[in-house]
Amino acid sequence: MSAPQPSAEALVSVSNIHTHYGKSHILHGVTLHVGAGEVVGLLGRNGVGKSTTLKTIMGLAQPSQGEVKFAGRAVTGLPAHKLARLGMGYVPEDRRIFRFLTVMENLRTGLDRRGVTAQRKQELLDKVFAYFPVLAERRHQPGGTLSGGEQQMLAIARAMMLEPRIILLDEPTEGLMPRMVSQIAQIIGALHRDGVAILLVEQNVPLTLQASERIYIMEKGMVRHHCAASDINVNDEAIRQYLGV
Amino acid sequence: MKKRSHKTYWIGFCVVVALLAAAPLALPDFWRRFLTEILIWGLLAMSSDLLVGYTGMLSFGHSAFFGLGMYGAAAALLTVSPPNLWLAVGCGLVGAAGVALFAAYFSTRLRDIYFAITTLIFSQIFYVIIFTWTDVTGGENGLTFRRPPLSIPWIYATPFTNETLHWFVLAVVTASYLILRRITQSPFGMVLQSIRENENRTRAVGYPVERYKVVAVMLSGLFAGLAGVLYAIQNRFAAPDFVYFLVSGETVIFNVMGGIGTLIGPIVGAGFFLLLRETLSRFFTEYYLIPVGMMFIAMVIFMPQGLLGFARNWLNR
Amino acid sequence: MSAILEIFAAIPYDQVLIQTVNGIVTGMILALVASGLTLIFGIMDVVNFAHGELFMLGAYIGVVVLATTGSFWLALLIATLIVALLGAALQIVTLRPLLGRDPLTTILATFGVSLVLQNYALWQFGPVARKIQEPITGSFQLLYLEYPWYRLLIAALSAAIIGALWLFLKFGTWGIWIRAATQDRVMAQAMGIPVPWVHTGVFAIGAGMAAASGVLFGPLVGVTHAMGLDWVLKAFIVVVVGGMGNLGGSIAAAVFISLLEAYASIWVSPAQAVIVSFVVLILTLLIRPTGLFVPTPK
């Protein structure tokens, strides 16, 4: 297998991490990397540890072994809020909108940081409202009253408020209508053009293959396959096995 | 292996009981009395361990059960003449059980901290009632009475001596320990422990969790009441101070210091606490709770398994 | 019909009016104590057993500062700040290590803190009650009573502090952080909110509010080392009746319970009037264990 090696300029590199939840051993030595501005897909069946990989990178789960590096710096064991401030955005699987905060307040959780001028704040807001006009309309509505698709947009917009260098996107199209799915694909493309790296966990294989440059496939808490997105043949029996399609 | 540890346990048990029984013959009066008190407070602590250690319910209201045990015994000793030991025990238990049923019915609807707060508030209700109902309870001054003779009904009666009182207390506490141990190992006790581990799952499996909790609180209250009866008999009074929250707080301290979920641990904790109080109050007078409180906080943070658990881990190392 | 009229005629309206005013005054103080408690509970699942002791300590610091500077307002300010700092230190030392452990351990730790603080106060200030001189001494005619203006001032000040808290939570960056962390601690952290420090900050705010209420309430009764338990008990009741972690509910419940106790004290002694709030609690547990003053959860 011709697995591209982590380049020197990898933005996020994960080497051999093991993560446990209580007594269950979820990750058995995951190694992967995401280059600056690169979109990387992470595929696999349910329960193979894709979400846990994202959580471990984000500092929401502590690995018992292994190392996470961000922009050349070892960040293993750093609390999530520090990683967020370093420029790591996280969009979790179940979106986790602050239900009782308005759309605007949800955005402010990421926007009200030290060193962001009022002008810069306005620019950031204008940018996400241009991407997601519906959020501008509902800016004073509590997050919990939005529809599923709107909540997904808010979750992405909220992460963008951090001006991240990478966004960890966990199943952004789960449970969305087809029209919304294509909108999410457009957003991923737009973020990519802005130079934001994305680590995308998805069940929607065609979308992932179309959006990503490289693909990792996980099974049983380990990376089993790694290649360029264009090299994947969905009809390959081995790939079908891994993905459960 | 299993059989041998079983045997070691019973040998250890017999040795400890024998030592405790022989102690009053060797100890000076002050320390004999001290030992008797440790046993009584240990029984109270053990009763609350059934809730906090085995069912996962932290009670901050054990003073109510203890106090009602005291006042129940007092009622029997003051109204019936000549005073009868077993009637006092019976009345104390009835008093404690009544309070326990009342408190259990309401407070078991709640979990965790809500349960803790509710038990605390219930104990305050009884404190206020006892404190203000001066005609019956003697209010702030409490009630004093004579100690009943040690008796086997219709057969034999003799006044308590210091030694026989100690043996009587030891017998009651040992019997209570064996009963509580049996309860925790019975199928009923297993259900309580599964409630502690996962209440929802226990309910889903089909156990009427609320009913089990009510019974657990009742049992715990009964043994706490028994401790109250013993204390009343030893000291010949019942006072509202013993219904007050501080007693509940001390019970919690005994449990945490000794190690919850072990039955023996709380007795060790009670002994440790009383010894600490005895030693520290020589240096800190009545402010001994400042260092004890700090030690308690440190134990909550660093030694959550208590003295007994710590010793056990250390021995097994 | 005449029986009903007799009942109405038997109500001592003058006393009812006076007790209404009294009830609102104590209710506002209680609301101030309870809102700190419920804020701490809401955001970090910590039942602060030492809340009453922070109230007591605030009152004592008020006594000391008032004695040295002669200014009640300075005493109020300094007591609030010192106790807020103390609260922050306590949170860091005793509660932070317990993060992620059973919430019951936090009640144990704060219980230990309350023991230490209470006995420290006894040691430092002795068993004799201290008095705080009220800053304004005027009074007005309420029926046949000379009713002190100060009591109304307390109610107004408590309301103002609670109002300020509300504005802070509603509009401030920290307010948004606090509310976000209350709703979803993990996601708040992933958004770069320093949740451990938000916890410390909230504990400090709650402690400061308890201290402020202690100073405000000081002139009405003596300041003693044991005054904390009564308040923390009442605040617990308020917080349960109002719905745990619900600020508005706590305020409503505080006023409601204080009014009931004030009315009850027309007929029974104040010590017994406490039972009324216990009964309210029991009824709440029976009818709506989630709290009387919250909308039914969907």
Image (cartoon, grey):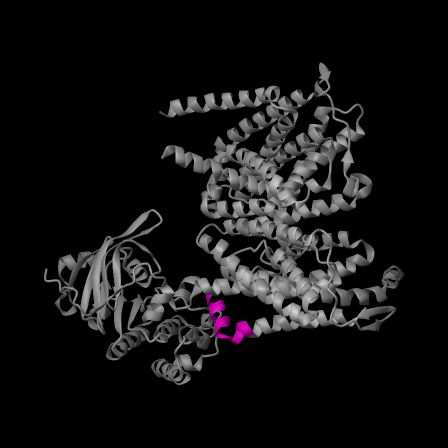
| Tag count | 0
The verdict on residue C182 being magenta is yes
Instruction: Please report the residue visible at 65 percent of the width from the left and 53 percent of the height from the top.
Output: C124
Q: Position of residue C46 (x, y in %)?
A: 52, 56
Is residue B188 placed above or below A245 in the rendered structure? Answer: above
As drawn, the residue found furthest toward the left would be A2
Secondary structure of the magenta portion, mostly? helix
Q: Position of residue A163 (x, y in %)?
A: 33, 76
Instruction: Please report the residue visible at 39 percent of the width from the left and 85 percent of the height from the top.
Output: A119
Is residue C217 placed above or below C129 in the rendered structure? Answer: below
As drawn, the residue found furthest toward the top would be B155
Is residue B283 in view from this perspective?
A: yes
Q: Nearer the viewer, residue A182 or B62?
A: B62
The verdict on residue C133 being magenta is no
Q: Nearer the viewer, residue A192 or A242?
A: A192
Instruction: Please report the residue visible at 61 percent of the width from the left and 66 percent of the height from the top.
Output: C80
Is residue C288 found left or right of A232 in the rendered image?
Answer: right
Is residue B99 placed above or below C94 in the rendered structure? Answer: above
Q: Nearer the viewer, residue B252 or C273?
A: B252
Q: Position of residue A167 (x, y in %)?
A: 30, 70
For residue A202, what is the image quadrant? bottom left
Is residue C246 in view from this perspective?
A: no
Quarter in which the N terminus of chain C is drawn: bottom right
Q: Nearer the viewer, residue B124 or A85?
A: A85
Q: Position of residue B164 (x, y in %)?
A: 66, 20
Is residue C151 found left or right of A212 in the rendered image?
Answer: right
Magenta stretch in the rendered image: C168-183
